[in-house]
Image: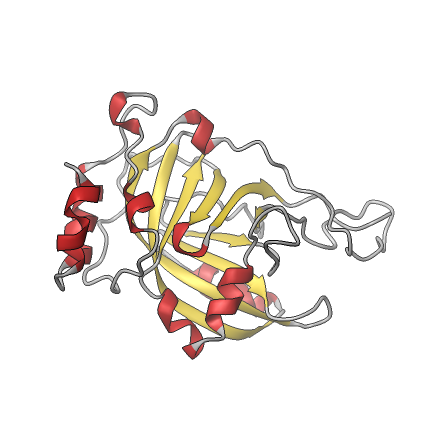
Amino acid sequence: MDLVGILPALLAGAGVFLVVAGLFYYLQPASADSAAASPTPTLSVAPYSLPPRLSAAPSTSAGATAAIATRIRIPALAIDLPIVAAPANEEFPLCNVAEYAVLDKPMAYPGLPQATYIYAHARGLPKYSANMFLPLLTQSKINSGAAMIGMWVEVYTADNQRHVYQMSQVIRHVPDSSSAFDGAIAAKTDQLWLQTSEGTIHDPLKMQVVAQPVGVLAASSADAHPTGQGNICSDAPKCKSPNGGGCRR
């Protein structure tokens, strides 16, 4: 089915999300390198914010595998970043990548009945080589981020899958403390949580976006394994300890 050809008609109807979401459920993961492995529905819908979900996504299947997140795309906000593990003893996040949170375990397994938690700097083009999460922060300041509700987020995993989520909640002014993870830790179903800073290096407040699963598509190995590993930010603070990570020596 040619999603590009039917998109204008879908957008004209109130049932646009249910119809498009249905396409995802029929396009469940296939062989990653088969002819059906590279559908591009999100490319055609990038300029649009779809309506909020009208029904819950299917429960995680018993066959879901624990594959680590490797890349995040938010087409409507021109965000496309590799996802990497945080440096050991991280004191400051890296630039030009997103990172996954590690609490008692890595929170980076889309598709499992738990939250995936991804964070990145609120920085972006043209100063940096990629849009980090600055567009999320910018949009959150406009009507409390209402325009982001319904936007699609793609999270690729190491097993060549593309997990598609839809933003459902924007949370502003979150204190920088362990309680910021409470909602994500409590998740018993597949969820995606995104985080970025609301101010300068010394600003303790964060903003979060919560997204719910839409479906899963196969991805090519090249798409699911970006090469960028990030770099220490030029304005990163000096390391406080000899083995600090992400900071300047």
Give the side of residue 211 with respect to residue 158, left or right: left
* Location of residue 62 with respect to 117 vertically, above or below: above
Q: Nearer the viewer, residue 106 or 4?
A: 4
Name which residue lies at 54% across and 42% down: 83
Percent across and percent down for residue 182 are: 50, 66
Image coordinates of residue 178 in percent, x first then y, are 60, 66
Q: Can residue 221 be seen in this view?
A: yes
Which residue is at the front of the view, 8 or 155? Answer: 8
- The number of callouts visible is 0
- Quarter of image, res 35: top left
Residues 197 and 41: in front is 41
Quadrant occupied by the N terminus: top left
Residue visible at 66% across and 54% down in the picture? 127
The way the protein has been coloured in the rendering is secondary structure
Q: Is residue 214 above or below residue 70?
A: below
* Residue 46, above or below 174: above
Residue 202 in percent (x, y) is at: 73, 70
* Residue at image coords 41%, 29%: 159
Counting from the top left corner in percent of width and height, residue 82 is at 54, 41
At 44% from the left edge and 32% from the top edge, which residue is drawn? Answer: 223
* Residue sitting farthest toward the bottom: 143
On screen, residue 57 versus residue 207, left or right, reads: left
Q: Is residue 158 visible?
A: no
